[in-house]
Amino acid sequence: MIAVPTDRIAFEAATSPVAQEAMQQLVGRYGNCPLDMAKIVVALGGDGAMLETIHRVLDRKVPVYGMNRGSVGFLMNTFSVDDLPGRLARAQAAVLHPLRMTAVTATGQVIEALAFNEVSLLRQQRQAAKIRITIDGRERLAELSCDGVLISTPAGSTAYNLSAHGPIVPLSANLLPLTPISSFRPRRWRGALLPSTVEVLFEVLEVDKRPTAAVADFTEVRDVVSVAVAEDRTISVTILFDPDQGLSERILVEQFTV
């Protein structure tokens, strides 16, 4: 149970007209606390808006409650202006840990970024990417010829990972899906389920001929030569869901959706 005074709620909204209108309605009813003083943040939009809000408040360590004013809204609750303090007080919490991406570019630049959904490598031009995959220092796949490859968090396993025909993973499983995107060789490889404690290294082969980009949520790094990925358990974010609609339940329901 989270009891939050209405004057300590901050609202963040996507730029779409429907999200902006929803924010006006909620601010008109409950006011809008400055983000740096808030005890809870309400995100309005779709899953992209939720991810952006999570990254924005990560250092503040405040819980985030989303309301769907976007399209899919897997991480969001149903929108309503009424009884927001009551809904927040009854909300169930889910704690998420991100993946940390460390990408090295062709010029030697090192770029780090966090991903609560997935880290993906994607071909930049018409030719397939060629990628070597090493796990905890041991080569597991010498060459994957593909449009790309991704590694997902359990929370993100229902997003891009699912679209790429990867498995849905329960939050409590401590597993990370590793999923190819349009794999050409080896044709029968469908990916792997990895312990959440591993470090995965992707090395781009034929860098000049087959340029490849890396994306951590919405941070894109182009012309990478290697990308290391590991779960960062020192960082966490709490997201809130209405009763009986928690994230674990949503992930379970998604596995029976046809």
Image (cartoon, rainbow, N blue to C red):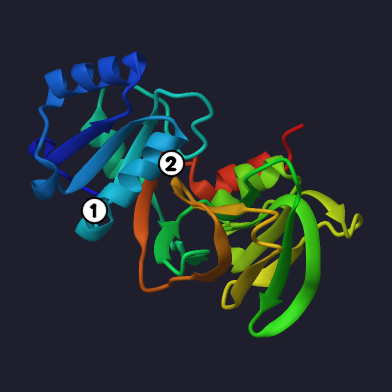
**Does residue 163 appear anywhere in the picture?**
yes
- x, y percent for residue 256: 74, 39
Q: Quadrant of residue 5?
A: top left
Left or right: 224 in relation to 109 = right
Tell me which residue sits at (40%, 44%) in the image. 51
Name the kind of residue labelled 2 in the image.
Pro
Name the kind of residue labelled 1 in the image.
Val
Q: Is residue 132 above or below residue 44?
A: below
Q: Is residue 58 above or below residue 23?
A: below
Q: Quadrant of residue 254?
A: top right
Tell me which residue sits at (67%, 60%) in the image. 177
Q: Is residue 194 above or below residue 68?
A: below
**Residue 111 or residue 256, whichever sits in front:** 111
Q: Quadrant of residue 139?
A: bottom right
> Residue under circle 2?
243
Q: Which mark is residue 129?
A: none
Q: Which mark is residue 62?
A: 1
**Does residue 81 appear anywhere in the picture?**
no
Q: Quadrant of the C terminus?
A: top right
Left or right: 27 in relation to 21 = left
Left or right: 118 in relation to 111 = right
- x, y percent for residue 219: 43, 49
Tell me which residue sits at (51%, 47%) in the image. 247
Q: Secondary structure at mark 2?
A: loop
- x, y percent for residue 246: 48, 46
Q: Residue furthest front?
A: 208
- x, y percent for residue 62: 23, 53
